[in-house]
């Protein structure tokens, strides 16, 4: 009986820690509008996990808050694409902005190759620099794969193909930023 109770407790904790694991986001249905309650939740609960990033803004009438998850990996010797969660105050929008590190040296096009070792599938996600919808598509496709077990990634740009999202810290930073974004725009 005691073992059964321990097993049930562990299962409950595991399910509770990843409540969105089974939710698949449609990458072709972007959403950027936020609501008062989602902004308040983010501001009061989740914003403390982010650092503000200073980026030059050409449009002074639009105030953008650019945020980076505070546990995002900062290592220019690896291919890391951090995500900036951007909120625009005057039109109540939010979007994701990709922030490749210096390892990419200005490449604007890259491919993410993935392999699902559990189900024996593989594929490719292509990205070329684009607007909010392009970045939503790219990030959502990766997010959906991150929720599966035993998926590995490599990124290809120029003539290089290197491991990508290969540490728990990198995966968590990507996943958590996307979950917070999806909550802001009510996709989760």
Image (tube, rainbow, N blue to C red):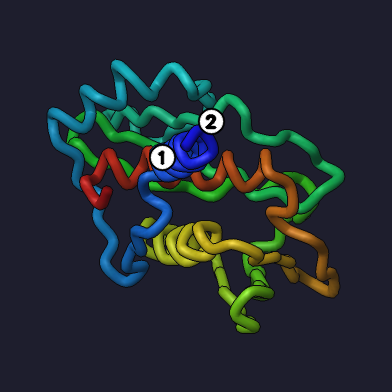
Residue sitting at 24 percent across and 45 percent down? 185
Between discs 2 and 1, the one toward the N terminus: 1
- Image spot of residue 19 (x, y percent): 37, 45
Say left or right for 155 vs 88.
Answer: right
Residue 86 placed where, x, y %? 39, 37
Mark 2 surroundings within 10 Å by alpha-carbon count, few (fewer than 14), some (14 through 19), many (20 or more): many
> Which quadrant of the view contains residue 62?
top left
Residue 124 lies, in percent from the top left, at 61, 79
> Which mark, by number, is residue 74?
none
Q: Which image quadrant is residue 151 in?
A: bottom right
Circles 2 and 1: CB atoms closer than 8 Å: no
Disc 2, SS: strand
**Gap in Å between the C-alphas at discs 2 and 1?**
27 Å
Measured as percent of width and height from the top left, residue 181 is found at 36, 42
Q: Is residue 169 above or below residue 103?
A: above
According to the picture, the residue beneath numbered tag 1 turns out to be: 12
**Residue shown at 61% from the left, 83% from the top:** 121
Q: In the image, which disc is placed on residue 69?
A: 2
The residue that appears at 50% across and 58% down in the rendered structure is 147
Q: Residue furthest front?
A: 1
Which residue is located at x 14 percent, y 36 percent?
A: 35
Residue 39 in view, yes or no: yes
Q: Secondary structure at mark 1?
A: helix
Report whether 165 appears left or right of 178: right
């Amino acid at each position: 009986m005691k073992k059964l109770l321990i097993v049930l407790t562990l299962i409950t904790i595991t399910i509770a820690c990843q409540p969105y694991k089974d939710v698949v986001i449609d990458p072709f249905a972007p959403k950027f509008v936020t609501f008062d309650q989602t902004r308040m939740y983010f501001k009061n609960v989740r914003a403390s996990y982010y650092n503000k990033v200073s980026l030059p803004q050409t449009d002074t009438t639009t105030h953008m808050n650019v945020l980076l998850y505070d546990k995002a990996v900062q290592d220019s010797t690896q291919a890391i694409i951090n995500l900036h969660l951007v909120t625009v105050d005057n039109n109540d929008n939010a979007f994701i902005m990709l922030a490749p590190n210096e390892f990419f040296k200005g490449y604007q096009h890259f491919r993410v190759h993935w392999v699902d070792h559990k189900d024996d599938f593989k594929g490719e996600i292509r990205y070329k620099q684009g607007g909010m919808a392009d970045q939503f598509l790219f990030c959502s496709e990766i997010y959906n794969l991150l929720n599966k077990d035993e998926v590995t990634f490599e990124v290809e740009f120029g003539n290089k193909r290197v491991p990508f999202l290969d540490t728990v810290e990198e995966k968590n930073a990507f996943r958590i930023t996307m979950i917070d974004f999806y909550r802001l725009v009510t996709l989760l």
